[in-house]
Image (cartoon, helix red, strand yellow):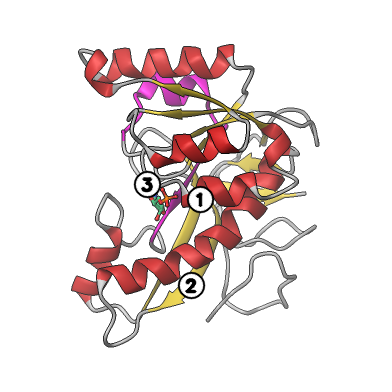
Amino acid sequence: MFFDPFLPLRGGNGLEGVHRPGHGIGGNLGSRTYTPRRIGRRRSQIDIAVLASGSGTNLQALIEAPEVRPHIRVVVSDRPEAPALGRARAAGIETAVVPWSDHPDRASFSVALADLVEEAGAKGVVLAGFMRVLSADFVERFSGRILNIHPSLLPAFPGARAVEGAIGHGVKVTGVTVHFVEEAVDTGPIVAQRAVEVLPDDTVDTLHRRIQVEEHRLYPRVVAAFVTGALTLEGRRVVWS
Ligand code: GRF
Protein backbone atom coordinates (compact mmCIF):
# COMPACT_ATOMS: atom_id res chain seq x y z
CA MET A 1 0.00 0.00 0.00
CA PHE A 2 2.77 2.42 0.93
CA PHE A 3 4.52 2.38 -2.40
CA ASP A 4 7.92 4.04 -2.56
CA PRO A 5 8.56 5.34 -6.08
CA PHE A 6 12.26 5.50 -5.34
CA LEU A 7 12.65 1.78 -4.76
CA PRO A 8 12.92 -0.53 -7.80
CA LEU A 9 9.72 -2.40 -8.57
CA ARG A 10 9.40 -6.09 -9.33
CA GLY A 11 7.58 -6.81 -12.60
CA GLY A 12 3.84 -7.42 -12.82
CA ASN A 13 2.76 -5.65 -9.65
CA GLY A 14 0.02 -3.62 -11.31
CA LEU A 15 1.62 -0.26 -10.54
CA GLU A 16 1.81 0.95 -14.13
CA GLY A 17 2.54 4.61 -14.52
CA VAL A 18 4.94 4.81 -11.62
CA HIS A 19 8.68 5.18 -11.41
CA ARG A 20 11.03 2.32 -12.16
CA PRO A 21 14.49 3.80 -11.74
CA GLY A 22 16.59 3.24 -14.80
CA HIS A 23 13.75 1.54 -16.64
CA GLY A 24 11.33 4.31 -17.51
CA ILE A 25 7.76 3.47 -16.51
CA GLY A 26 5.01 1.12 -17.55
CA GLY A 27 1.71 2.20 -19.04
CA ASN A 28 -0.17 1.58 -22.24
CA LEU A 29 0.34 4.30 -24.83
CA GLY A 30 -1.55 2.49 -27.58
CA SER A 31 -0.44 3.27 -31.12
CA ARG A 32 0.15 7.01 -30.70
CA THR A 33 3.61 8.23 -31.51
CA TYR A 34 5.18 10.53 -28.96
CA THR A 35 8.16 12.79 -29.40
CA PRO A 36 10.21 12.66 -26.23
CA ARG A 37 10.49 16.09 -24.62
CA ARG A 38 13.45 16.34 -22.32
CA ILE A 39 13.41 18.83 -19.47
CA GLY A 40 16.45 20.83 -20.58
CA ARG A 41 19.32 18.89 -22.12
CA ARG A 42 20.18 15.46 -20.84
CA ARG A 43 21.10 15.72 -17.16
CA SER A 44 21.55 19.49 -17.44
CA GLN A 45 20.80 21.27 -14.18
CA ILE A 46 18.19 23.98 -13.82
CA ASP A 47 17.45 26.56 -11.16
CA ILE A 48 13.94 27.07 -9.88
CA ALA A 49 11.50 29.57 -8.43
CA VAL A 50 9.26 28.23 -5.65
CA LEU A 51 5.76 29.73 -5.54
CA ALA A 52 3.91 29.54 -2.21
CA SER A 53 0.82 31.21 -0.73
CA GLY A 54 0.66 29.71 2.75
CA SER A 55 2.55 28.21 5.63
CA GLY A 56 5.33 26.83 3.44
CA THR A 57 6.04 23.50 5.10
CA ASN A 58 6.78 21.97 1.69
CA LEU A 59 9.07 24.90 0.92
CA GLN A 60 10.85 24.18 4.21
CA ALA A 61 11.36 20.55 3.17
CA LEU A 62 12.89 21.78 -0.10
CA ILE A 63 15.13 24.26 1.71
CA GLU A 64 16.38 21.44 3.94
CA ALA A 65 17.20 19.17 0.99
CA PRO A 66 20.90 19.69 0.18
CA GLU A 67 20.37 18.68 -3.48
CA VAL A 68 17.58 21.24 -3.91
CA ARG A 69 18.52 24.28 -1.80
CA PRO A 70 21.32 25.60 -4.09
CA HIS A 71 18.89 25.59 -7.03
CA ILE A 72 16.25 27.84 -5.40
CA ARG A 73 16.77 31.28 -6.96
CA VAL A 74 13.69 32.95 -5.50
CA VAL A 75 10.55 32.28 -3.46
CA VAL A 76 7.51 34.16 -4.71
CA SER A 77 4.13 34.63 -3.08
CA ASP A 78 0.86 36.30 -4.03
CA ARG A 79 0.36 37.13 -0.32
CA PRO A 80 2.77 39.50 1.47
CA GLU A 81 1.86 37.92 4.83
CA ALA A 82 2.53 34.32 3.74
CA PRO A 83 4.67 32.55 6.39
CA ALA A 84 6.49 30.84 3.51
CA LEU A 85 8.28 34.13 2.81
CA GLY A 86 9.69 34.18 6.34
CA ARG A 87 11.04 30.66 5.89
CA ALA A 88 12.82 31.73 2.70
CA ARG A 89 14.29 34.86 4.30
CA ALA A 90 15.52 32.82 7.27
CA ALA A 91 17.35 30.59 4.80
CA GLY A 92 18.88 33.56 3.00
CA ILE A 93 16.83 33.05 -0.15
CA GLU A 94 15.60 35.98 -2.22
CA THR A 95 11.86 36.63 -1.90
CA ALA A 96 9.31 38.55 -3.94
CA VAL A 97 5.60 39.28 -3.76
CA VAL A 98 3.27 39.62 -6.71
CA PRO A 99 0.00 40.70 -5.05
CA TRP A 100 -3.05 39.29 -6.77
CA SER A 101 -4.96 42.49 -5.98
CA ASP A 102 -2.46 44.62 -7.95
CA HIS A 103 -3.60 43.05 -11.22
CA PRO A 104 -6.86 43.39 -13.13
CA ASP A 105 -6.96 39.75 -14.24
CA ARG A 106 -5.24 36.36 -14.20
CA ALA A 107 -3.39 37.06 -17.46
CA SER A 108 -1.72 40.23 -16.19
CA PHE A 109 -0.91 38.62 -12.79
CA SER A 110 0.66 35.65 -14.56
CA VAL A 111 2.79 37.82 -16.88
CA ALA A 112 4.19 39.72 -13.88
CA LEU A 113 4.94 36.41 -12.17
CA ALA A 114 6.58 34.87 -15.24
CA ASP A 115 8.76 37.95 -15.81
CA LEU A 116 9.90 37.89 -12.20
CA VAL A 117 10.75 34.17 -12.36
CA GLU A 118 12.84 34.66 -15.51
CA GLU A 119 14.57 37.77 -14.19
CA ALA A 120 15.62 35.74 -11.14
CA GLY A 121 17.35 33.30 -13.49
CA ALA A 122 14.98 30.40 -12.82
CA LYS A 123 14.15 28.02 -15.66
CA GLY A 124 11.76 25.84 -13.65
CA VAL A 125 8.79 26.61 -11.40
CA VAL A 126 7.88 24.57 -8.31
CA LEU A 127 4.45 25.18 -6.80
CA ALA A 128 4.35 24.55 -3.06
CA GLY A 129 0.89 25.44 -1.84
CA PHE A 130 0.40 28.22 -4.41
CA MET A 131 -3.31 29.01 -4.38
CA ARG A 132 -3.65 30.84 -7.70
CA VAL A 133 -4.38 29.22 -11.03
CA LEU A 134 -1.75 30.19 -13.60
CA SER A 135 -2.75 31.48 -17.03
CA ALA A 136 -2.42 29.38 -20.17
CA ASP A 137 0.36 31.72 -21.34
CA PHE A 138 2.33 31.15 -18.15
CA VAL A 139 2.04 27.37 -18.54
CA GLU A 140 3.09 27.63 -22.18
CA ARG A 141 6.08 29.84 -21.33
CA PHE A 142 7.38 27.23 -18.83
CA SER A 143 6.03 24.24 -20.71
CA GLY A 144 7.15 20.97 -19.11
CA ARG A 145 9.01 22.92 -16.43
CA ILE A 146 6.33 23.44 -13.76
CA LEU A 147 5.80 20.98 -10.89
CA ASN A 148 2.93 20.88 -8.39
CA ILE A 149 2.16 18.83 -5.28
CA HIS A 150 -1.44 17.88 -4.55
CA PRO A 151 -2.89 16.21 -1.43
CA SER A 152 -4.74 13.30 -3.09
CA LEU A 153 -4.09 10.43 -5.46
CA LEU A 154 -4.97 12.21 -8.70
CA PRO A 155 -7.07 11.95 -10.78
CA ALA A 156 -9.24 11.49 -7.66
CA PHE A 157 -10.17 14.68 -5.80
CA PRO A 158 -8.66 17.48 -7.87
CA GLY A 159 -9.15 21.08 -6.78
CA ALA A 160 -8.78 23.04 -3.58
CA ARG A 161 -10.65 20.72 -1.18
CA ALA A 162 -8.95 17.41 -1.88
CA VAL A 163 -8.68 16.23 1.74
CA GLU A 164 -12.30 17.13 2.52
CA GLY A 165 -13.29 15.34 -0.68
CA ALA A 166 -11.53 12.14 0.30
CA ILE A 167 -13.13 12.07 3.76
CA GLY A 168 -16.55 13.01 2.41
CA HIS A 169 -16.43 10.27 -0.20
CA GLY A 170 -15.39 7.68 2.35
CA VAL A 171 -12.29 6.42 0.53
CA LYS A 172 -10.01 4.16 2.56
CA VAL A 173 -6.81 5.30 0.86
CA THR A 174 -5.80 8.71 -0.39
CA GLY A 175 -2.35 10.26 -0.70
CA VAL A 176 -0.03 12.64 -2.45
CA THR A 177 0.63 13.33 -6.12
CA VAL A 178 3.47 15.28 -7.70
CA HIS A 179 2.68 16.21 -11.28
CA PHE A 180 3.71 18.48 -14.10
CA VAL A 181 1.35 21.40 -14.58
CA GLU A 182 -0.68 21.87 -17.72
CA GLU A 183 -3.39 24.41 -18.40
CA ALA A 184 -6.24 22.44 -16.83
CA VAL A 185 -6.04 22.22 -13.03
CA ASP A 186 -4.54 19.05 -11.49
CA THR A 187 -4.57 17.03 -14.72
CA GLY A 188 -0.90 17.15 -15.80
CA PRO A 189 1.45 14.16 -16.21
CA ILE A 190 2.04 12.37 -12.92
CA VAL A 191 5.63 12.16 -11.68
CA ALA A 192 5.22 10.30 -8.37
CA GLN A 193 2.55 9.28 -5.88
CA ARG A 194 2.41 8.07 -2.28
CA ALA A 195 -0.55 6.40 -0.61
CA VAL A 196 -1.88 7.40 2.81
CA GLU A 197 -4.47 5.32 4.66
CA VAL A 198 -7.66 7.07 5.78
CA LEU A 199 -8.46 6.05 9.38
CA PRO A 200 -12.06 5.70 10.61
CA ASP A 201 -11.84 8.64 13.01
CA ASP A 202 -9.83 10.94 10.75
CA THR A 203 -10.75 14.61 10.53
CA VAL A 204 -9.57 16.87 7.71
CA ASP A 205 -6.78 18.08 10.01
CA THR A 206 -5.51 14.68 11.16
CA LEU A 207 -5.56 13.26 7.65
CA HIS A 208 -3.92 16.34 6.11
CA ARG A 209 -1.16 16.16 8.74
CA ARG A 210 -0.33 12.56 7.76
CA ILE A 211 -0.51 13.48 4.08
CA GLN A 212 1.94 16.30 4.69
CA VAL A 213 4.43 13.92 6.32
CA GLU A 214 4.49 12.06 2.99
CA GLU A 215 4.62 15.32 1.02
CA HIS A 216 7.71 16.43 2.88
CA ARG A 217 9.43 13.15 2.05
CA LEU A 218 8.35 12.96 -1.56
CA TYR A 219 8.65 16.51 -2.89
CA PRO A 220 12.36 17.07 -2.13
CA ARG A 221 13.21 13.80 -3.88
CA VAL A 222 11.19 14.66 -6.97
CA VAL A 223 12.44 18.24 -7.11
CA ALA A 224 16.02 16.99 -6.71
CA ALA A 225 15.48 14.86 -9.81
CA PHE A 226 13.85 17.81 -11.62
CA VAL A 227 16.68 20.27 -10.97
CA THR A 228 19.30 17.76 -12.08
CA GLY A 229 17.52 17.17 -15.39
CA ALA A 230 16.62 13.56 -14.55
CA LEU A 231 12.94 13.84 -15.59
CA THR A 232 11.81 13.46 -19.19
CA LEU A 233 8.29 13.81 -20.56
CA GLU A 234 7.20 11.38 -23.27
CA GLY A 235 3.63 12.38 -23.94
CA ARG A 236 1.97 11.91 -20.55
CA ARG A 237 4.64 9.54 -19.31
CA VAL A 238 7.32 10.84 -17.02
CA VAL A 239 10.57 8.93 -17.41
CA TRP A 240 13.31 9.07 -14.79
CA SER A 241 16.94 8.68 -15.80
C1 GRF B 1 -0.04 21.03 0.65
O1 GRF B 1 -0.86 20.12 1.31
C2 GRF B 1 -0.05 20.81 -0.83
O2 GRF B 1 -0.34 19.50 -1.19
C3 GRF B 1 -1.15 21.71 -1.31
O3 GRF B 1 -1.09 22.83 -0.47
C4 GRF B 1 -0.54 22.46 0.78
C5 GRF B 1 0.56 23.43 1.08
O4 GRF B 1 1.05 23.29 2.37
N1 GRF B 1 -0.96 22.04 -2.72
P1 GRF B 1 2.35 24.07 2.84
O5 GRF B 1 2.13 25.56 2.60
O6 GRF B 1 3.51 23.55 2.05
O7 GRF B 1 2.49 23.76 4.31
Is 131 left or right of 189, judged from the image as shown?
Answer: left
Between 225 and 40, the residue placed more toward the observer is 225
Eyeballing the image, is 69 above or below 15? above
Is 146 left or right of 200, judged from the image as shown?
Answer: right
- Does residue 146 appear in this view? no
Eyeballing the image, is 240 above or below 169? above
Q: Which mark is residue 58?
A: 1
Q: Which mark is residue 195?
A: 2
Mark 2 or 1, nearer chain start? 1
- Does residue 221 appear in this view? yes
- Furthest-front residue in view? 90
Between 101 and 30, the residue placed more toward the observer is 101
Dot 3: few (<14), some (14–19), or many (≥20) neighbours within 10 Å? many
Secondary structure category for the residue under label 3: loop
Whole-angstrom CA distance, mark 1 to mark 3, is 18 Å
Q: Amino acid at mark 3?
A: Asp
Whole-angstrom CA distance, mark 2 to mark 1, is 17 Å
Q: Residue at x 45, y 63 (%)?
A: 212
- Estimate the x, y position of residue 20 in percent, counting from the top left: 71, 63
Q: Which mark is residue 139?
A: none
Reading the image, the residue beneath label 3 is: 186
Q: Amino acid at mark 1?
A: Asn
